[in-house]
């Protein structure tokens, strides 16, 4: 008797039913001949040797203990995305490498705990004008991300406290100017399954001035549609650089089961990449017809290979 291949969708305790819009994923996979289940990644009672193909989904708490998360991945026989991807993509220093390889990213000032920066040295790294963003290099979603303005002394002081707090915890910090085009045009997320663009989502920022964002907040999806020709062009540029990076790391190429690229138009006819999400990406599967089925198709194709 032939049994259906097992697929384990992995989440965290706070999201027992995966991301909003993914509630129907179990049924979609079952209809494609899979035996799906949902498990929490750090549940000690789960037998991961019997998990089949593991698909990492809403593991939004990995940043609280990245070493434990990476240790968990090492015991998995078959996981998507791969263990190497889960390693490098959980630390945003990858953006520094991708920028050096030609990918247009938001200019970033990196502050490291090993630098032992004084308050004055941190202050000199803040931008001289406009708004700016403080975020840890290891973070999930908008957790611990703050948006501030340079013209208000209280906001600069709040930003200083956040930076010193993160560095004091041994966490690397990213300082970026706030890209005004986000407020004007919103962010665009391109969602890929098995290397192909599935859909594009336009969002409004969840970052509010003078605050560290509530980690429970999500960006507001404004529109979702099939990717247009411009998104295809940008997506291909991003895809080429990403796969060059993978080949440089591994000596061979590797296909991603899923990938979400967050970008913003730069006002000059091109774009800036904000993030490449290959670990806990909300894929906005409920935002447009066909997206949930596209993802189920991609998983089914992998598990039946």
Image (cartoon, helix red, strand yellow):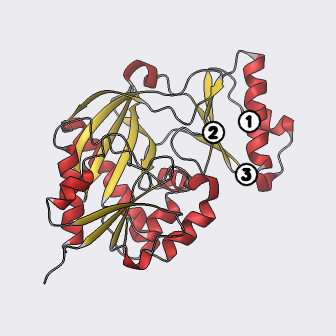
- Position in image of residue 16 (x %, y %): 43, 50
- Which residue occupies 20% across, 66% down? 34
Extreme residue toward the bottom, this view: 1
Q: Which mark is residue 112?
A: 3
C-alpha gap between disc 3 and disc 1 = 14 Å
Please give left or right for residue 199 compared with residue 51 in the image: left
Placement of 56 over or under 84, stated as above or below: above
Label 2 near label 1: C-beta < 8 Å?
Answer: yes
- Position in image of residue 129 (x %, y %): 66, 21
Circle 2 packing at 10 Å, graded few (<14), some (14-19), many (20+), is some
Q: Secondary structure at mark 2?
A: loop
Q: Secondary structure at mark 1?
A: helix
Please give left or right for residue 232 compared with residue 252 in the image: left
Residue 143 in sight here: yes
Give the camera-side residue of 291 and 85: 291
Label 3 near label 2: C-beta < 8 Å?
Answer: no
Q: Secondary structure at mark 3?
A: loop
- Which residue occupies 40% across, 55% down? 57
For discs 3 and 1, the disc positioned in front in the rendered view: 1
Give the camera-side residue of 150 and 270: 150
Image quarter in which the N terminus is found? bottom left
- Which residue occupies 44% across, 25% down? 182
Residue 124 in sight here: no
Q: Which mark is residue 144?
A: 2
Q: How many marks?
A: 3
| Residue located beneath label 1 in the image | 162
Placement of 297 over or under 158, stated as above or below: below
C-alpha gap between disc 1 and disc 2 = 9 Å
Please give left or right for residue 74 compared with residue 265 in the image: right
Label 1 near label 3: C-beta < 8 Å?
Answer: no
Q: Earlier in the sequence, mark 3 or mark 1?
A: 3
- Position in image of residue 113 (x %, y %): 77, 52
């Amino acid at each position: 008797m032939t049994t259906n291949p097992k697929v384990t969708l992995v989440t965290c305790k706070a999201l027992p039913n995966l991301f909003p819009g993914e509630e129907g994923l179990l049924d979609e996979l079952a209809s494609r001949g899979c035996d799906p289940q949902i498990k929490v990644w750090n549940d000690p009672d789960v037998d991961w040797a019997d998990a089949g193909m593991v698909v990492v989904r809403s593991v939004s708490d990995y940043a609280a203990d990245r070493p434990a998360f990476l240790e968990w991945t090492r015991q998995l026989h078959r996981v998507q995305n791969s263990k190497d991807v889960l390693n490098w993509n959980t630390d945003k220093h990858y953006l520094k490498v991708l920028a050096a390889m030609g990918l247009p990213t938001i200019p970033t000032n990196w502050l490291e705990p090993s630098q032992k920066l004084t308050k004055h040295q941190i202050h000199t790294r803040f931008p001289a004008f406009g708004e700016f963003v403080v975020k840890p290099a290891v973070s999930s979603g908008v957790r611990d991300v703050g948006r501030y303005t340079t013209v208000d002394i209280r906001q600069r002081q709040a930003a200083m406290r956040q930076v010193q707090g993160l560095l004091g915890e041994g966490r690397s910090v990213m300082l970026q100017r706030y890209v005004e085009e986000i407020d004007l045009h919103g962010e665009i997320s391109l969602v890929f399954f098995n290397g192909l663009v599935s859909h594009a989502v336009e969002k409004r920022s969840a970052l509010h001035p003078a605050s560290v964002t509530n980690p429970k907040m999500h960006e507001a999806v404004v529109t979702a549609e099939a990717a247009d020709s411009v998104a295809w062009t940008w997506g291909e540029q991003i895809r080429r650089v990403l796969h060059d990076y993978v080949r440089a790391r591994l000596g061979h190429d590797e296909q991603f089961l899923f990938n979400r690229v967050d970008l913003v138009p730069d006002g000059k006819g091109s774009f800036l990449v904000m993030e490449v999400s290959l670990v806990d990406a909300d894929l906005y599967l409920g935002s447009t017809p066909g997206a949930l089925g596209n993802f189920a198709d991609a998983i089914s194709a992998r598990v039946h290979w």
